[in-house]
Amino acid sequence: MGYVFPKKAAGLAYKFFSEPREGKLLPNAIPDILKEAEQEVLFHEDCTIQTYTWRGNENKILLVHGWESNASRWEEFIILLKKSKCTIIALDGPGQGLSSGIEFNIPLYAKHVNTLMEKYQPQYIIGHSMGGATCLYYQYKYNNPLLQKMVLLGSPSEFELILSNYKKTISLNDKVFQLLKEKIVERFNIHPSEFSGKKFASGFNFKGLIAHDIDDTVVAFNEGKQIAEAWKSSQFIETKGLGHSLHDKELYEKIHLFLFEE
């Protein structure tokens, strides 16, 4: 199709790139950890945003999951965070969990994050994978002065690298790939080359913690390293054997220490 109908092929390529295949939840079958939370639906434009809150003290944390996931991915970490008596807030991203929509992309996700930040005003934000990239873009875009600390887990830095890997995965020819990039610029008013996590982080003056596993086969280890090197007030944790998910009690305890006991 890329050779015969390149514009149609680019449209399909964008569709496959932006529509999660997994991560949806059914209202009558949500995980137990989410049942424990106060559930509230917020609205942004024509989207509904499913939120979850575990009430605690004035210390507030927002948890931002990644691609093809939902708020339940934080279960192990939430169990630890509850011991600190902080208030924990999580959301289901666009087209995932119980939130509405079909398309998932970072600019839209950042708008949803901003909706929660304005309502709950958390001092800390934690993102995994594409959720981490969303946190970086959110702060770059909205420059929230109330944000004190950010934690990134297995987060990508360079959007052009993501696109290049996608091109290889589905064997796009150069013509269709160029049309895909033009569609992204038209859709979000930002060129893929300008969408850089390390660039966004280089302007941050609050504290950050970046964790990345050397065995991550989804997002290259060097991506996290580049963000940490650009972010002068951040620290970097290198892990091994945790893969992309980074679910680990010891790592979660280090994050807890960074947030509350540093």
Image: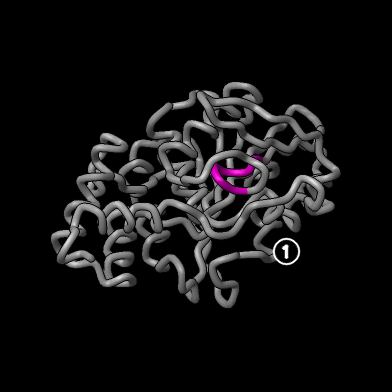
Question: Which residue matches tag 1?
Answer: 249
Q: Which residues are magenta?
A: 91-96
| Main SS class of the magenta portion in the image | loop
Q: Is residue 57 magenta?
A: no
**Residue at 44% over, 48% down:** 133
Residue 206: where, in percent of width, then height?
A: 48, 35
Residue 59 sits in which quadrant? Answer: top right
The front one of 179 and 135 is: 179
**Residue type indicated by callout 1:** Lys
Residue 62: where, in percent of width, then height?
A: 63, 38
The front one of 25 and 246 is: 25
Instruction: Give left or right: position of 147 versus 137.
Output: right
The N terminus lies in which quarter of the figure?
bottom left
The C terminus lies in which quarter of the figure?
top right
Residue 31: where, in percent of width, then height?
A: 79, 54
Residue 257 visible in the displayed image: no
**Residue at 30% over, 52% down:** 11
